[in-house]
Amino acid sequence: VYKRQPYHFEGFTHSFQPCYDFKARIQKDHGLTFGADYNALYQAASDSLGTDHAAGGVVRLYGTWTLLGRGSPDTGALTFKVENRHRLGTDISPQDLAGEIGYAGLTATPFSDAGSLLTNLYWHQSFKQNRVAFLAGIVDVTDYVDVYGFVNPWTDFINLAFSTNPTMPAPDQGLGAAVRWSFTDDFYVLAGLADANGDPGDPQDSIDSFFGDHEYFKHIELGWIGSWQNRFTDNIHFTAWQVDERKAAQVDEGWGLAFSFSRKLDDHWLPFLRAGYSDGGGALLDRSVSAGLGYFRQGRSDVLGIGMDWGRPAEETFGAGLDDQYTAEVFYRMQLTTHITITPDIQLLVNPALASDQDRIWVAGLRARLAF
């Protein structure tokens, strides 16, 4: 009989049993689940117009406090998350590396130098055996719009081409609301809006902008899921979005469409196919098609991910006459213990749109995550 050993250093897990017990008591007695993590990333490019390497870190504290309906399918809960994003001894953060190498995109989506941020503070309420649910407050629309099995940039792909949809100009975290209706066990519709000028560094400014500027990012999604438990991995959906003109930022209005397919096979394989189209709105790409495959290693929590993307840079954002660019990314996530993850990552950028003299650029990265 095969004995599963999910972590490379399984023995360390038992050392933290008192911590697990404490968190379990807090959840049982008060309905509060919480956690914290520290994420670090180093990236180096084979060529650059300027700086060719970057490092950054992000510390996060997050949780959910269930105040209504605890133990039932219909709950009311407050979700919160605060972060600090910073450079680690380099001139630029990993999120800025794309601009240095002439790539129309982002080689590392969340690793910026933005400082302290409030990225979640919203109420989530479900009704009718979780058939209907809504959320409202400070939200991150990429947490629930056009998501799939590898959407998490802290653990999976980190290039924007794969972690979200590069044709969708999703705003930074700010005030917003959304509602989901699961009209069968398998099909759902999701719709909402959010402040197009979200600013997690100044939540009060986001609130003033929402009610004062009336510039919104709006979305609607129709999708199929295999089951509620596997709603991210077994998911097929179509998304439509529209964003208002952002006058202060001098960005025109726009709209777009997205498609996503992912389905886990045989508990080990997760293929995906995603596509997007945009017309204005400040997106990085106005056409994109990506495909890839994930492999979940038997007996371990390790994951191998491979992705490839074709993209056409948005003329409204970068100007006319740019070549199409191609992106490939491979990562291998090693779950050393329950709390420690190491992820080597390599990206190949072919015909980077803003570096006309470069045929290809390699970006090697190493990411580490410590979570409790």
Image: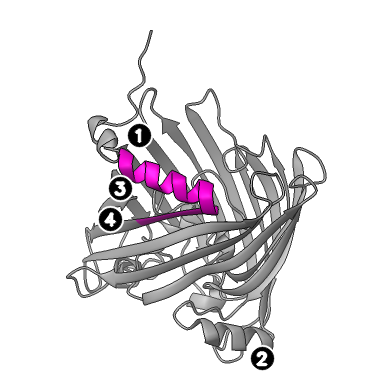
Q: CA distance from mark 1 to mark 4?
A: 22 Å
Locate residue 111: give its quadrant.
bottom left
Looking at the image, tell me whether mark 3 or mark 4 is earlier in sequence order. Answer: 3
Q: CA distance from mark 3 to mark 2?
A: 42 Å
Please determine whether, in this image, residue 304 is positioned above or below residue 355.
Answer: above
Provide the major secondary structure of the magenta segment: helix
CB contact under 8 Å: marks 1 and 4 = no
| Amino acid type, residue under disc 2 in the picture | Gly
Disc on res. 302 = 1
Secondary structure under badge 1?
Answer: loop
Disc marking residue 212: 2
Q: Are marks 3 and 4 in contact (CB under 8 Å)?
A: no
Residue type pointed to by label 4: Val
Circle nearer the N terminus (1, 4): 1
* Residue that label 4 marks: 363
Picture coordinates of residue 84 (x, y %)? 35, 70
- Whichever of callouts 3 and 2 sits on the residue coming sooner in the sequence is 2
Cα separation between marks 3 and 1: 14 Å
Q: Give me the residue at 41% from left, 56% from top.
A: 159
Q: Can residue 280 be seen by looking at this rendering?
A: no
Residue furthest top in the image = 1
Amino acid at the residue labelled 1: Asp
Residue 345's tag is 3
As drawn, the residue found furthest toward the left would be 89
Q: Is residue 46 left or right of residue 270?
A: left
Q: Would residue 133 be found to the left or right of residue 330 on screen?
A: right
Which of disc 1 and disc 3 is earlier in sequence? 1
Measured along the vertical axis of the image, is residue 365 above or below residue 283? Answer: above
Which of discs 2 and 4 lies nearer the camera? The answer is 2
Which portion, as a residue range, is magenta?
Answer: 17-36
Q: Whole-Å distance between the Cαs marked 2 and 1?
A: 47 Å
